[in-house]
Amino acid sequence: MYNPSRIPEAIAEYHAELTAIRRDIHAHPEHAYKETRTAGLVAERLRAYGADEVHAGIGGTGIVGVIRGSRPGGRAIGLRADMDCLAMNEETGLPWASTRGGFMHACGHDGHTTMLLGAARYLAKTRNFAGTVYVVFQPAEEGQAGAKAMMDDGLFTRFPMQAIYGLHNAPWVPRGSIAVRNGAMMAAADRLEILIEGRGGHGGMPQFVADPVLAAGHVITAIQSIVSRNVDPCDSAVVSICAMEAGKMDTYNVIPRTVKLIGTVRTYRKEVQALVEEKLALVVGNTAAAFGCTGRVEFIRGYPATINHPREAALAAEVGRALFGEANVITEINPNTGGEDFAFFLEAIPGAYIWVGQKSETSVGLHHPCYDFDDRIIPTGAGLLAAITEKELA
Ligand SMILES: [Zn+2]
Ligand SMILES: [Zn+2]
């Protein structure tokens, strides 16, 4: 009798090989659109596992593997992993630590790539489904929209699919559990640039200047009213100013002509995003004007919010329950204010993004110099992706 709960067990048979692959990728991290070694390894493994087709160079360094089921079927789905690392130094001291200074797999994309390879190996061997599964390995998730690059390069026209699934390790979800919810999983991440222009001059004679530093101080305070006074209390948003440039540190008596502020805005709903953008222009412009300055806002849209589709989120949860038990599937969880470029896929076609828990006594947060992907969850994530495929393409 068909029993999907056996799938992680079956994948655990090659846990040792997958762990070796994960640590090899970890030791050789590659940054956005430069994932050539990783992509080469992925393509080589997919061929060795018996994928029917392997396509390279999609959206830069992206790879798509094609695996057809043993039964005919018109339906196709995609499974996605990200391959890129972060530009930061590793401090884990592990034997498989990064061999490339300034680069590190601090978000676990080495683990995601490995888990998708594990799923591909199982699916290519068993082919217990009808139709086609595309395994999508994307470049440049960290801030450079590799998912969009693959779409712009024809991902969904060359490989038409009715749904797509992706996962991310989650150090805030207990190991052994997965978390998936209908609706927002991750926020829209937009960039904010504010330029306040006044009339600089002598620091000792402020009556002759229009001081952009004073105006910037009021702007920073005033824009915090947007979340507290304009956004509906039942919605949520973040407005953060993270950097400021004004004058020169070796010049104590000159009021500068301009001040530049840089920050980020996080929202889940398009209406809230539009409201924050509109209020920012108003508050910045009018506050600056009150001090005789001008204030201009550039609102640069980054990744959209990652919004799971109801059917696919429910299917992922159902598969998770069959694999890991009712208690290990969390659907009541808050979305996260990080950004994720899987959002572009979910704007184009239905799908779901799932967190695979790796929280333990020693776990460290994502993007931390001491972070490492937990190899114990490889069969969990790989098994989930494989079981979703068998369910979707039953
Ligand atoms: Zn990250
Ligand atoms: Zn990540």
Image (cartoon, helix red, strand yellow):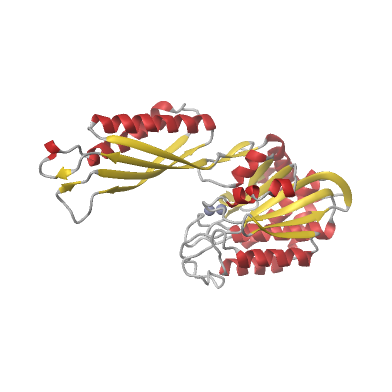
Residue for point 34% across, 30% down = 283
Given the current orientation, which residue lies at the most extreme left position? 204
Q: Quadrant of residue 376?
A: bottom right
Residue 136 appears at what percent x and percent y? 69, 54
> Left or right: 272 with respect to 294?
right
Residue 364 in view: yes
Residue for point 64% across, 57% down = 112
Residue 186 appears at what percent x and percent y? 55, 42
Count of marks overlaid on the render: 0
Q: Is residue 204 above or below residue 90?
A: above
Residue 70 appears at what percent x and percent y? 88, 53
Residue 174 appears at what percent x and percent y? 59, 50
Residue 10 in view: no
Residue nearer the viewer, 123 or 348: 348
> Left or right: 92 with respect to 253?
right
Q: Quadrant of residue 309?
A: top right
Q: Is residue 53 above or below residue 24?
A: above
Q: Is residue 250 above or below residue 237?
A: below
Residue nearer the viewer, 269 or 211: 211
Residue nearer the viewer, 169 or 278: 278
Residue for point 73% across, 66% down = 45
Quarter holding the C terminus is top right
